Amino acid sequence: MPSQQKDLYLPRPAEIREVIAENSQIKTFVLSFVDRQYHDKFSYAPGQFLMVSIPHCGEAPISVSSTPANGGTIHLSVRRAGKLTEAMHDMKKGDVVGLRGPYGRPFPMTDLAGRDLLFVAGGIGLAPLRSVINTCLAAGHGRRITILYGSRTPSDIAFQADLATWGQTANVSCLLTVDRAEPGWEGDVGLVTALLAQCCLAPRESKALLCGPPMMIRAVLAELAGRGFADEDIITTMERHMKCGVGICRHCHMDDKLVCKDGPVFTLEELKRLNVLELRG
Ligand SMILES: Cc1cc2nc3c(=O)[nH]c(=O)nc-3n(C[C@H](O)[C@H](O)[C@H](O)COP(=O)(O)OP(=O)(O)OC[C@H]3O[C@@H](n4cnc5c(N)ncnc54)[C@H](O)[C@@H]3O)c2cc1C
């Protein structure tokens, strides 16, 4: 096997520099590669993911939630789901995980310039969008940015520091909703789609970026189509269980496309050409 192909599967040790508890189920791990030279050359784009591994716990794809423009450390925001993510949640500063990547087609960042941007996220879905939002802000995106974020309960609201910063940024409006209120919550209660009614959107001048559970994506897609967003202006991410992450095992196929290589970012126009169960009503 040529050495380049062997490297494709080679996890590189990365040290946890900091662990940020976003809520009871999500932690953000701040990492850097142990090999300083490799770390300094490492680059990625918003929407790409890394395959994270821990010996005896397996490997899983996790989106990068940090911003390439800021350089420095790599952020991975991880929700407890199974063996690997549970093991990761038990890790602390100084522990080491394996990382390979970055993989996948990123968000089309150049197409976002000069457009109003609508971000709609549910739960951990804000992780990859956080990378896009902070990249746009770092680049001085001058148009309107609207962020709609839904959580199960107020205690489940993740990325609170980012939400507070975005809420105070001049051209950004940030609206939150929860499925179930808790004592002291005076904000919206209900689906994230209800927040769309509070937004002043110019669909022909906008791009919408979505990430969240399939039910949320389906509801938001229907709402955006009703408001006149063109299919090519709606961009979402797709999740499939994957093994190799590099288009070889075909575990993550969607019709003739592979989520790891052709995605995970797709426009609605692209998805409509595929037989994608999540998009059916
Ligand atoms: C491109 C991409 C980006 C992602 N980014 C993030 C992120 O930023 N943060 C994050 O927290 N998660 C992210 N995920 C999801 C994450 O990869 C999964 O939750 C992963 O399965 C966790 O691994 P685990 O070993 O902890 O759990 P697993 O052991 O994989 O179990 C997780 C759940 O999946 C089920 N499951 C396991 N294997 C299969 C299978 N073959 N078919 C169907 N169901 C199965 C289990 O029963 C369980 O309910 C992303 C996924 C993709 C595809």
Image (spheres, rainbow, N blue to C red):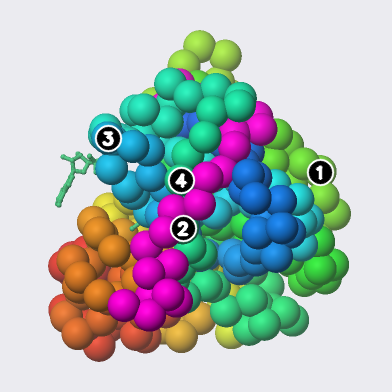
Alpha carbon distance from label 3 to label 4: 12 Å
Whether label 1 touches label 2, CB < 8 Å: no
Element type at mark 2: strand
Amino acid type for the residue under numbered disc 1: Gln
**Quarter placement of the N terminus:** bottom left
Element type at mark 1: loop
Alpha carbon distance from label 2 to label 4: 7 Å
**Quarter placement of the C terminus:** bottom left
46 or 99, nearer to the observer: 99
228 or 47, nearer to the observer: 47
Above or below for 14 versus 86: below
Amino acid type for the residue under numbered disc 4: Gly
Nearest to N terminus: mark 1 or mark 4: 4
| Residue 17 magenta-highlighted | yes
Nearest to N terminus: mark 3 or mark 4: 3
Element type at mark 3: loop
Q: Which residue is mark 2?
A: 100
Please indicate, yes or no, whether residue 130 appears anywhere in the rendered image: no
186 or 118, nearer to the observer: 118
Whether label 2 touches label 4, CB < 8 Å: yes
Q: Residue at x 61, y 68 (%)?
A: 45
Number of residues whose C-alpha sits closer than 10 Å to that of mark 3, classed few (under 14), some (14–19) or many (20 or more)? few
Magenta highlight range = 1-25
Residue 40 % position (x, y): 73, 59
Q: Which mark is residue 98?
A: 4
Q: Which residue is mark 3?
A: 56
Nearest to N terminus: mark 1 or mark 3: 3
Residue 110 % position (x, y): 67, 82
